[in-house]
Amino acid sequence: MSGDVVIDVRGLTKRFGDRTVVDKFDLKVPRGAIYGFLGPNGSGKTTTIRMVCGLLKPESGEGEVLGFDVLRDSLKIKERVGYMTQKFSLYEDLSIRENLEFITRLYGLDRRGERVDQALHDLGLAERQTQLAGKLSGGWKQRLALAACMIHEPDLLLLDEPTAGVDPKARRDFWDQIRRYAAQGVTTLVSTHYMDEAVQCDSIAYIAYGKKLLDAPTADIPKHVGLHGWRISGRPLQQSQMLLERAPGVDIVARFGAEIHACGKDASALERAVRSVQQAQTHVRIEPIEAGFEEIFIYLMSGSMDNFQ
């Protein structure tokens, strides 16, 4: 494997009973990249992340993570990865500092006091270091969890919906820190449901119900999907939405506040549908738009079959 590639897995497959949760998944992530991992709930993102970091063994597939075989070297991979789970998993009856000290002992690290001091400084936790973890708000718990992930100086950071349930400022601060780590050469694979976070990633892989549907540099995704869009505004909109949902050429209709976005792959058929609605509903206004990431991912989800079905 090239020294410039941190994750290179091919054909990863995981089943639970007779259900295939991840189906022949491929992923290649270069060193220092921030790689977005998107998909609906239950699509296999967490299972894939756990296979990548050595916590789960795939039924089939192969590859290397940090230069180690994903099937045979799971212990070596786990030692060099920082993994932040969806659920806060540190000790709530210990202080911030005590939690970080425990992690340094768990990894058998040297310079423990120095490492803890640096982590507290990097994540802005120094003034709160004596506060119990269980008393922290969601944003401060998130900072502590990230500090714990990074205290052993991993080369790969795996983040499973790390900003769910935290306020917008905490999310911005979190992403500022992730970019600082990337500048130091740390590779990040992050799953998220927030489109404003997804667009900050260098590349995005989209998985739906076990199958990868898209994997491309973020800037190239709109042209890969080829979705066209129109904005419909005015009041009332409910009748316009119902007409669009039944119209040929319209692949998705989504409400965005006080307007509707109608999108489709066939530009001509989509425009005919939108203009026919305007003729039928003369009070509405229409204008062409570029389909954004949210519309793109709604479109991808609409074409995916839930693997529970």
Image (spheres, rainbow, N blue to C red):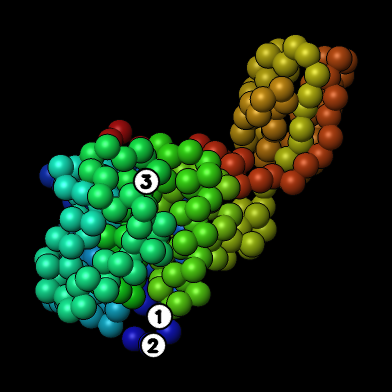
Question: Position of 163 compared to 113: left or right?
Answer: right
Residue annotated with mark 2: 2
Residue annotated with mark 1: 5
Amino acid bearing label 3: Trp
* Residue 136 on image: x %, y %: 31, 40
Q: Secondary structure at mark 2?
A: loop
Mark 2 and mark 3 residues within 8 Å of each other at the beta carbon? no
Q: Nearer the viewer, mark 1 or mark 3?
A: 3
Mark 1 and mark 3 residues within 8 Å of each other at the beta carbon? no
Query: How many other residues sit within 10 Å of disc 1, few (<14), some (14-19) or many (≥20)?
Result: some
Residue annotated with mark 3: 140
Amino acid bearing label 2: Ser
The front one of 47 and 199 is 199
The residue drawn where x is 34% and y is 61% is: 120
Up-down relation of residue 209 to residue 63 (above or below) = above
**Label tally:** 3
The residue drawn where x is 70% and y is 27% is: 260
Up-down relation of residue 308 to residue 228 (above or below) = above
Lower sequence index among marks 2 and 3: 2
The residue drawn where x is 45% and y is 77% is: 184
* Residue 4 on image: x %, y %: 43, 84
Query: How many other residues sit within 10 Å of disc 2, few (<14), some (14-19) or many (≥20)?
Result: few
* Residue 41 showing in the rendered view: no
Question: Position of 149 compared to 224: left or right?
Answer: left
Query: How many other residues sit within 10 Å of disc 3, few (<14), some (14-19) or many (≥20)?
Result: some
Amino acid bearing label 1: Val
